[in-house]
Image: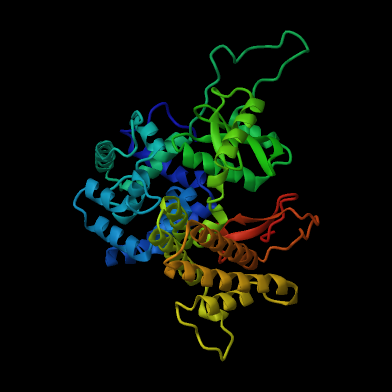
């Protein structure tokens, strides 16, 4: 099914046909999730608020890249915000209730409201605007713009006696079915001799001819582009170059969208317009310069896999590191120590549970960080082969806990003490999180298929693992699901 030149505003049968075609344009896991929403939202609507797990899934449905931010919201914050949004009498109030939640901008808020109150709120999306023939706004955070677009969609739904979910599927599908016409005069061009330069492949089919592509790396680049330029649609992404600079591997990706071409460079990931940077070699040098300038900030960056596993604790650690920048007096240094102490307690609450305690042993108090950390270490680094790792985790946790408590109460604490507390806290969080991810994914050291050591933890929440991660071989593509 190809789309018409204009959305069929007056043709109900055509609109229903587009809505039916929607299911063929989305992935199977998205289909299952959307059907599950229809059933799971009924109790939430009756209760008048979204439980946090459902809130995270609904937000991920709109934009998966902000998952760590969604998960960093507390249960109470989600409950309060969504309860207010359920009761709001107008769009502005409902959106204002949701956008204070971390990761939720206006477009994500409209997606949440669309599922929470399906008779009232359409989703604001770049595809919907294209289908309606509407220009993009100066800012997607303009509530008045959304209100105007929402009323137009509601009027269209009323005209054909359709619900807003059906209208959303139809509008989204119409733009998804975009076909590129053959340029005028090009249909009958014949070669003049045997030396023929083949035509340029459309970006959306070029990927079929890329050899040795690494699927999880391409997926990460596509998701990054969708988060940074969510008004553009990625047609093709291909890794052109890799090199190691200052001990870090930098990958260069050529990304084609429906509006232009971009470079995406990794470690740290950033995008650059190919119009502004036509030379890849010059761009790598520029990117490395930027990378060097933010090296100190990178020391405080939280790896996405870590942040997704214990978002609240890592957020507290970032706040402690930021407080260190402004600390000048002893009481400031003590406050940094207190933040580190709260960070450690938050972290252990996020990763520990009573199943880790051997039968017959007493359950430690919530504030007993040392004993809880010992039980966690015994669980995630068990066995004779992990004895050294287990010992390191326990010793590091105990020493750090004693250090941050001392800094918290030391009236003669100095800047060096506070900095040491921040660095030690990061070390504990990083060591435990890395070991925990390895334990939960049970990633083998070597690939069982090709014996490569290039094993990574790939974020695949649709597979239903406890952590959301599976072991993946970057060399041959083997995963635990194979």
Question: Residue placed farthest to the top in the image?
Answer: 192
* Residue 35 in view here: no
Identify the residue shown where x is 47% and y is 59%: 414
Question: Residue placed farthest to the bottom in the image?
Answer: 360
Identify the residue shown where x is 34% and y is 32%: 132
Q: Nearer the viewer, residue 221 or 134?
A: 221
Identify the residue shown where x is 36% and y is 34%: 129
Percent coordinates x, y for residue 199 in the rendering: 66, 20
Percent coordinates x, y for residue 146 in the rendering: 28, 39
Question: Residue placed farthest to the right in the image?
Answer: 451
Percent coordinates x, y for residue 8 in the rendering: 36, 32
Q: Is residue 476 above or below residue 205?
A: below
Question: Residue placed farthest to the left in the image?
Answer: 89
Using residue 51 as the reference point, say whether residue 206 is left or right of it: right
* Residue 327 in view here: yes
Identify the residue shown where x is 45% and y is 50%: 325
Q: Is residue 16 above or below residue 236?
A: below
Question: Which image quadrant: the C terminus?
Answer: bottom right
Using residue 286 as the reference point, say whether residue 348 is left or right of it: left
Q: Nearer the viewer, residue 428 or 220?
A: 428
Q: Nearer the viewer, residue 332 or 470?
A: 332
């Amino acid at each position: 099914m190809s789309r018409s030149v204009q959305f069929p505003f007056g043709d109900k049968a055509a609109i229903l046909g587009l809505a039916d075609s929607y299911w063929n344009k989305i992935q199977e896991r998205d289909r299952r999730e959307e059907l599950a929403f229809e059933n799971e939202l009924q109790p939430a609507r009756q209760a008048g608020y979204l439980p946090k797990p459902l809130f995270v899934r609904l937000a991920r449905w709109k934009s998966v890249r902000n998952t760590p931010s969604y998960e960093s919201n507390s249960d109470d914050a989600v409950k309060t915000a969504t309860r207010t949004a359920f009761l709001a009498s107008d769009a502005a109030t409902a959106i204002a209730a949701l956008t204070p939640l971390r990761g939720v901008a206006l477009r994500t808020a409209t997606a949440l409201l669309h599922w929470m109150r399906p008779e009232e709120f359409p989703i604001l999306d770049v595809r919907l605007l294209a289908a309606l023939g509407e220009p993009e706004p100066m800012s997607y955070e303009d509530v008045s713009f959304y209100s105007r677009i929402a009323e137009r969609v509601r009027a269209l739904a009323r005209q054909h006696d359709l619900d807003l979910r059906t209208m959303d599927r139809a509008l989204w599908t119409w733009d998804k079915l975009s076909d590129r016409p053959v340029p005028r005069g090009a249909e009958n061009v014949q070669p003049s001799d045997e030396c023929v330069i083949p035509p340029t492949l459309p970006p959306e089919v070029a990927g079929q001819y890329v050899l040795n592509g690494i699927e999880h790396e391409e997926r990460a680049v596509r998701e990054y582009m969708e988060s940074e330029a969510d008004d553009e649609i990625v047609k093709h992404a291909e890794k052109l170059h890799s090199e190691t600079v200052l001990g870090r591997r930098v990958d260069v990706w050529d990304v084609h969208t429906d509006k232009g071409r971009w470079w995406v460079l990794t470690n740290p990931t950033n995008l650059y317009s190919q119009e502004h940077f036509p030379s890849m070699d010059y761009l790598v040098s520029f990117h490395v310069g930027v990378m060097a300038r933010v090296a100190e900030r990178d020391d405080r960056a939280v790896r996405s896999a870590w942040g997704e596993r214990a978002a609240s604790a890592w957020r507290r650690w970032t706040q402690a590191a930021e407080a260190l920048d402004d600390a000048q007096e002893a009481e400031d240094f003590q406050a940094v120590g207190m933040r580190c102490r709260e960070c450690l307690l938050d972290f252990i609450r996020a990763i520990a549970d009573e199943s880790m305690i051997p039968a017959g042993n007493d359950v430690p108090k919530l504030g007993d960080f040392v004993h809880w950390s010992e039980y966690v270490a015994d669980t995630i680094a068990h066995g004779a082969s992990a004895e050294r790792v287990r010992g390191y985790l326990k010793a590091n946790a105990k020493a750090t806990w004693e250090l941050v408590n001392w800094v918290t109460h030391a009236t003669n604490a100095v800047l060096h003490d506070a900095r040491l507390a921040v660095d030690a806290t990061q070390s504990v969080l990083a060591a435990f999180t890395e070991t925990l991810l390895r334990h939960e994914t049970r990633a083998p050291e070597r690939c069982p298929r090709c014996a490569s050591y290039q094993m990574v933890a790939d974020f695949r929440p649709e597979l239903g693992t406890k952590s959301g991660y599976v072991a993946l071989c970057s060399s041959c593509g083997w995963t635990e699901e194979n």
